[in-house]
Image (cartoon, helix red, strand yellow):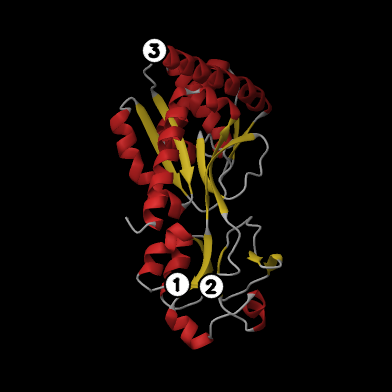
Amino acid sequence: MAYLDNIAVFVRVVELGNLSAAGRDMRISPAVASNRIKELEKHLGVRLFNRTTRQLMPTEHGTVFYAGAKQVLEAITEAEAAVSALSGQPRGTIRVTAPLGLGRRLIASGIPEFRDRYPDIEVRLRLSDHHVDIMKEGIDVAFRLGVLEDSSLTMRSIMECERVLVAAPTYLKARGEPADPRDLVAKKHDCLMLRYPGVREHFWTLKTPTGLTKVEVTGPFDSDDGDVLTGWALSGRGIVNKPRFEVEPFIRDRRLKVIMPDAPPTPVQLAAVYPHRKLQDPKVRLLLDFMAERCQRLIRDVLAGKW
């Protein structure tokens, strides 16, 4: 078992690039991770990494060993999943990621209940509005608000979510309320943008009576945290494009106002994406079923004013 643990640490170090990140991911100290790599190198009789001040790069031997080691770990995972399916007692670890707002509101709050139902399943949750490379970082399930772009992944649609443009009454009083999409540019409205390295969308696509219109919006504020944008909107700093369920309570208490309701942003798809082979894992299917039902129920409750 210790040898398999050493292999698992080696694989994560290759994938994450350093001992500290691999240690955090596997809940062990960098010193323990380093010792496991040394034990593996001693067993194999070769050096597996070239060490620099910032990163560990696999040697030629390390690259070759990684390919085989990855297959071994995947085979063990699939074998464990098959046994779980036969025994009816799913167990093991699921690595989950989600955007910050969605994760805080809908996913994180459901994990304790999921654990109560399935105490042998451990869930490790990572929240980030940055794009997470599922394959590289060993993620089992990613909940996303957007469009599936990676054809190597499988998508399970959960529901389509309405989006709205909203701003605080104080902002609209000071700057005027845009009457149509052209006003966003012509009147130089401050649009609050979700931006981070690699983001592609620097425009808003709006559904107008004459069809879809792309508006290249600008503004003095942007952030990689969607909740920060909502906070700026509430303080009167600009217009934000958000899934309605995230801002519905503020719309209801009139702290935010929906603008241009006849030209709303295109809806966004709430979905779970995962490597295709994970569909065969009973614990992953259980989590997908649980979270899909929960997200649908909670979003409907929010929009109905029940939550």
User: In screen coordinates, is 285 left or right of 194?
Assistant: left
User: In screen coordinates, is 141 left or right of 27?
Assistant: right
Q: Secondary structure at mark 3?
A: helix
Give whichever of 93, 45 is nearer the camera: 93
Q: Hey, which residue is sitting farthest front in the picture? A: 209
Please name the residue that numbered disc 2 is placed on.
221
Residue 91 location in percent, x, y? 38, 22
| 2 and 1 marks in contact (CB < 8 Å) | yes
User: Which image quadrant is residue 136 in?
Assistant: top right
Residue 41 location in percent, x, y? 54, 22
Q: Amino acid at mark 1?
A: Trp
Q: Secondary structure at mark 1?
A: helix
**How far apart are the two marked residues, 2 and 1, measured between alpha carbons?**
8 Å
| 2 and 3 marks in contact (CB < 8 Å) | no
Task: Please report the residue visible at 51 percent of the width from the left and 17 percent of the height from the top.
Answer: 76
Mark nearest the camera among 2 and 1 is 1
Residue 94 location in percent, x, y? 44, 32
* Quadrant housing the C terminus: bottom left
Residue 99 in view in this figure: yes
Mark nearest the camera among 3 and 1 is 3
